[in-house]
Image: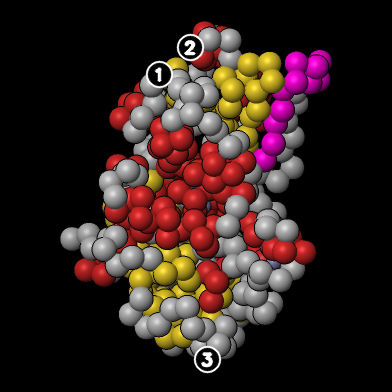
Amino acid sequence: MRIRATVLREPRQPLVIEEVELAPPRDDEVLVRVAAAGVCHSDVRLADGELGAGRWPMVMGHEGAGVVEAVGSAVSHVAPGDHVGFCIVPACRACSECSAGRFHLCLPAGEHGPRGVLMDGTSRLSRADGTVLQHALMTACFAEYAVVAGATAVPLPRELPLWQASLLGCGVVTAFGAVRNAARVAAGESAAVIGCGGVGLQVVAALRLAGAYPIVAVDLDPTKLDLALARGATDAVQSGSATTAARVIRTTGHGADHAFEVVGRPDTMRLAWDCLRPGGTAVVVGLAPQGVEVALPAIEFLADKGIRGSYYGSGDAASDLPRLAELALSGELDLASVVTSVEPLEAVDDALDRLRRGEGARTVLVLDSELAGHV
Ligand SMILES: [Zn+2]
Ligand SMILES: [Zn+2]
């Protein structure tokens, strides 16, 4: 079929909305009519060529939700008409990582995702002239339709409006998993959140639900600190000066039990480290450009401090998505309040520019306002 899709032709150039060819789903794949898609900071990294060469031409978009239009012959967990959110790591559930319960590190998914292909190693996207187009993170949902691996299409309750459901599959699952699976935050533990954009605000929400106290939001931008306070942060520290870490340490007593870096820069990773109490652990959620290194004062390993990464929630995203959707329906998780712009697909470059300037939280691109439930 022929669809409208947002194509990255060359890095650091505006994206182009093109008519492209989408091949039908194979046996274990699903065709989804996209309702809405979130714009994530990883989209900026891809669009700016910061994740390495060879990742274009590509149909962009990896955080989204829609309605199943057709399924391959081997798919039984969803049927046409079902609402689904996209899970960017369609775990095979058979490799050694999946067998050990580390579904986010699934080996075939990890091999094919960065190559811009689906689980069988090929793409369903092309131009009329035959040029093959990559799928962004196995999803490619800045488009009217997407063909995805069966495991990428996760069924969600239809009561949740799709413009809100669109956020679950990257920002929300990444943030909640960092708190629950990577840091395993317990009630009463203190936490600092460095960077309060779309994902950082979800980290704050997850910390509130985990009973963390105090929850110190840290950002350069006072308006993001206000958003964080509204979502459950107990304190706010404006960053950008030499005293930032000292102020966080004072607010938490003698340093945070947990510090979450949600920016992807070496200076903020170092700041997360500096905010820790002896014995505390920093979790790096932010995605840094390829080649960036971070320096730490090595003597402080003696203070039993730790630092670790977290990818895509460090757990089983496909099982977490429906649970997070239920949490949203129960009113415990407010998805709408991280959305600072709702725009048509054509506005995607403006959304990327706002992220480059560090402005606002999440933008949701609406492909079909009736389907998305946002009129
Ligand atoms: Zn993302
Ligand atoms: Zn696997």
Quadrant that contains the N terminus: bottom left
Q: Position of residue 322 (x, y in %)?
A: 42, 60
**Helix, strand or loop at disc 2?**
helix
Residue 306 highlighted magenta (yes or no): yes
Q: Sequence-wise, which precedes: disc 1 or disc 3?
A: 3
Would residue 284 appear left or right of 369 to someone viewing this image? right
Residue under circle 2? 251
- Give me the residue at 41% from left, 53% from top: 324
Q: Sequence-wise, which precedes: disc 2 or disc 1?
A: 1
Residue under circle 3? 73
Residue 348 highlighted magenta (yes or no): no
Q: Dot 1: within a 10 Å radius of its alpha carbon, few (fewer than 14), some, or many (20 or more) residues?
A: some
Residue with the most extreme bottom position:
73
What mark, if any, has residue 235 been given in the picture?
1
Q: Position of residue 202 (x, y in %)?
A: 43, 40
Q: Is mark 1 within 8 Å of ligand 1?
A: no
Q: Dot 2: within a 10 Å radius of its alpha carbon, few (fewer than 14), some, or many (20 or more) residues?
A: many
**Helix, strand or loop at disc 3?**
loop
Q: Nearer the viewer, residue 223 or 170?
A: 170
- The residue under label 3 is which amino acid type? Ser
Q: Nearer the viewer, residue 287 or 351?
A: 287
- The residue under label 1 is which amino acid type? Asp
Are the residues flagged by discs 2 and 1 in contact, CB closer than 8 Å?
yes
- Give me the residue at 54% from left, 41% from top: 180
**Helix, strand or loop at disc 1?**
strand
Quadrant that contains the C terminus: bottom left
Q: Which residues are magenta?
A: 298-309
